[in-house]
Amino acid sequence: MTTSPNRRFLLKSFATGAPALLASSSVAAPYHPQEAALVPGSIPVSQLPFHYDVNRDIHNLENGYWGVMPRTIAAEYSRQITMVNRDNSIWARNVLPSGSCLAGGGQEAQAAIARQVGCSPEEIAVTRSGSDALQLLIVNYRLLKAGEAVIYCDLDYDAMIDAMNWLGTHRGAKVVRFAMPEPATTANILQAYHDVLERTPNAKLLLVTQVSNRTGLVTPVKEIVAMARERGVDTVVDVAHGIACLDFKIEDIGADFAGWSVHKWTSAPLGTGAMYIRSSRLEDIDVAYDNHHIPVSKIQARVPAGTINFAAILTIPKAVDFHFAVGAAAKEAHLRALRDGWVDAVADLRNVEICVPADPARYCTITSFRLKGMTTEADALHLQRVLLQKHNVHTVWRGGIAKGPVIRVTPGLYSSPSDIDALVKALQAEHSLFV
């Protein structure tokens, strides 16, 4: 008996072919631009806040979790939910006379992501999240032998750290952890990676995070990847906070294996991620759970079978179109300007420690800080609550950092100067909280 549409059929079908801040200090009355074709470069950053329907009762500076969909993407997602719910297996089984079908929608999503990052669609698999993509790359890396070492640092993401530790408990790897230097510079970041590689001659796999979810530090990925490759060490690169936030293509960082969340800075619906494997390295990542429903020669075999949110996948091309309508360079400049707005304003507060260097190459929108005397996770949580309850500013504390916990500040594409001003006033009032 034929089963209902599920992730296995979706993936098999994929594989086989079936700059500046606003001038005003606050956002004006709601304005809904006319929906129009998303032409590259057609949306100025000054108009971005008007493309979002968000809760402005709270100054939300915690946009690192996932990306708010602008109105046009949310509308597309709603349309796709209605279509999938209405047509069901008629659509999935390619019965519609229009030719619209599950396979075509999946291929369009792959092609859109590939266009965004500058690679072949055959090097892209759609996943449920960046964590899914990266964990699959790590635990299914085939070239690791028992006794060989794998390396990660304190600023890497928890789910990826767990996967690297899994290689120790389940594959017999020697797991090596090191701390990113603070304060960081390009020179001492590179030196830290050089040193850990030098003292780990049996290293085989290195996890590299392009933009740390903990502090916002942007690492010189291309140089680190090349450094590792010279020593016969492969890298898995976490670009979850880099794709669609920084202006680059996947080839610019030299990665062979990378993963990211399409529901972060690309602003696709929740439950969308992407895996990149350079075509020449496909055989070095094992298929997922013996997923032989798909030919081993296809990247989709590296993703587990199972039902996924079809409507979310179908919305990815619209999200990529919106990304290009703003423009990667314009997005990066806009997000950096929002970040600079608060960092520059608190530079003279003696008790505020910014956790990334002033070098623009080493930061973008995410930037974390500590207050003098803030040494415990309980302190960080207390400050997070003070900022929200007293000043109506939403941030999030992050731990797992060798030097101690931080408060993470992440403006979003829709953020306004009033959000930034609120944080500045809060820090001016609270910077001596722990001293």
Image (spheres, grey):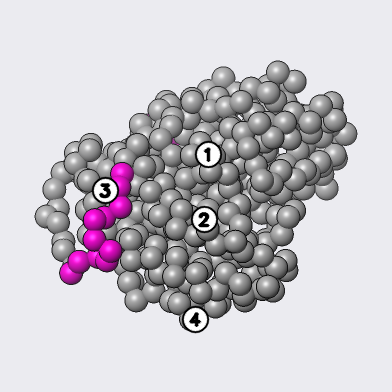
Indicate the position of residue 293 as horizontal and vertical percent values.
54, 38
In this rendering, position of residue 81 left or right of residue 345: left
**Amino acid type of the residue that numbered disc 3 sits on in the rendered structure:** Val
Q: Residue furthest bottom?
A: 389
Q: Which mark is residue 125?
A: none
Viewer-side residue, 136 vs 320? 320
**Which type of secondary structure does the marked residue at label 3 adopt?**
helix
**Amino acid type of the residue that numbered disc 2 sits on in the rendered structure:** Ala
Indicate the position of residue 185 as horizontal and vertical percent values.
63, 37
Viewer-side residue, 135 vs 71? 71
Label located before the other in sequence (2 or 3):
3
**Which type of secondary structure does the marked residue at label 2 adopt?**
loop
Query: How many neighbours does mark 1 have within 10 angstroms: few (below 14), some (14-19), or many (20 or more)?
Result: few
User: What span is colored magenta in the figure?
Assistant: 12-29
**Amino acid type of the residue that numbered disc 4 sits on in the rendered structure:** Gln
For discs 2 and 4, the disc positioned in front in the rendered view:
2
In this rendering, position of residue 119 left or right of residue 225: left
What's the residue at 39%, 74% (across, down)? 58
Magenta stretch: dominant SS?
A: loop
Q: How many marks?
A: 4
For discs 1 and 3, the disc positioned in front in the rendered view:
1
Q: CA distance from mark 2 to mark 3?
A: 26 Å
Q: Which mark is residue 359?
A: 1
